[in-house]
Image (cartoon, rainbow, N blue to C red):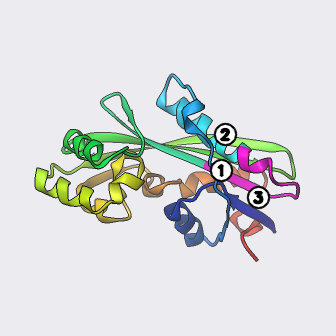
Amino acid sequence: MVPFVLASASPARRQLLQQIGIDPIIQPSYFDESVIQATTPTELVRLLARCKAETVAQSHSAPALILGCDSVLVLGGEIHGKPASPEVAIARWQQMRGQTGELLTGHALIDLAQGRTCVEVESTQVVFADISDAEIATYVASGEPLACAGGFALDGQGGAFVEKIVGTPSNVIGLSLPLLRRMLLSLGYTLGDVQGKK
């Protein structure tokens, strides 16, 4: 059994892993995302996921699997991470309503035992409901949008404002479970090989 470390403080990512039987060791990277420059959204999430995983890997000497993730919403060619303020969240929702966005999540899985790294990006289409200004104000006042890439949580109150998902739902929540399974297999592991905290 191999210890599994999640390089993220995200409760949603932790719950997704627990859903498939992995109880991860939580070790946020606190990586400074502002230092990363990328020309495309795909390159951005790929680099950020890798940097987060590598930052945490530096503090481990024993064999472990370390997963770093990063998500952004792409809408109208613009990259949206977490809204910086309620005002930004309201403006973003006014732009998002009735539109289709692309949720990209970078996944970086480092296997310290083998000295190997697997980095992949999953894309999922999100169709947003055409909600009113009043609904937007109420949702932003809940505080939930400020903690989420793209300003919404599919597994929270924001789920009421998503009309359709084209692709992997768990990717929109924070990590693609089917992709993680494939990444583990590429490194020679199955889900049954992975454990978290004792």
Q: Which mark identifies residue 189? A: 3
Closer to the camera: disc 3 or disc 1? 1
Is the Cβ of the residue at disc 2 closer than 8 Å to that at disc 3?
no
Q: Secondary structure at mark 2?
A: helix
Q: Secondary structure at mark 1?
A: loop
Q: How many marks?
A: 3
Q: Is residue 186 magenta?
A: no
Q: Check the image and report above or below for 49 versus 27.
A: above
Closer to the camera: disc 1 or disc 2? 1
Residue 89 percent across, percent down from the top left: 29, 46
| Residue at the (37%, 44%) spot, across then down | 84
Query: Which numbered disc flags the more N-terminal residue, 2 or 3?
Result: 2
Extreme-bottom residue of the structure? 198
Q: Which mark identifies residue 51? A: 2
Q: Which mark identifies residue 152? A: none
Left or right: where 106 falls relative to 187? left
Q: Check the image and report above or below for 70 versus 66.
A: above
Left or right: where 166 falls relative to 87? right
| Residue at the (58%, 48%) spot, across then down | 69
Residue 99 percent across, percent down from the top left: 23, 40
Is 119 in front, or is 83?
83
Q: What residue is shown with label 1? A: 29
Left or right: where 191 falls relative to 14? right
Q: Check the image and report above or below for 61 versus 83.
A: below
Q: What is the magenta range?
A: 55-68
**What amino acid is at disc 2?**
Cys
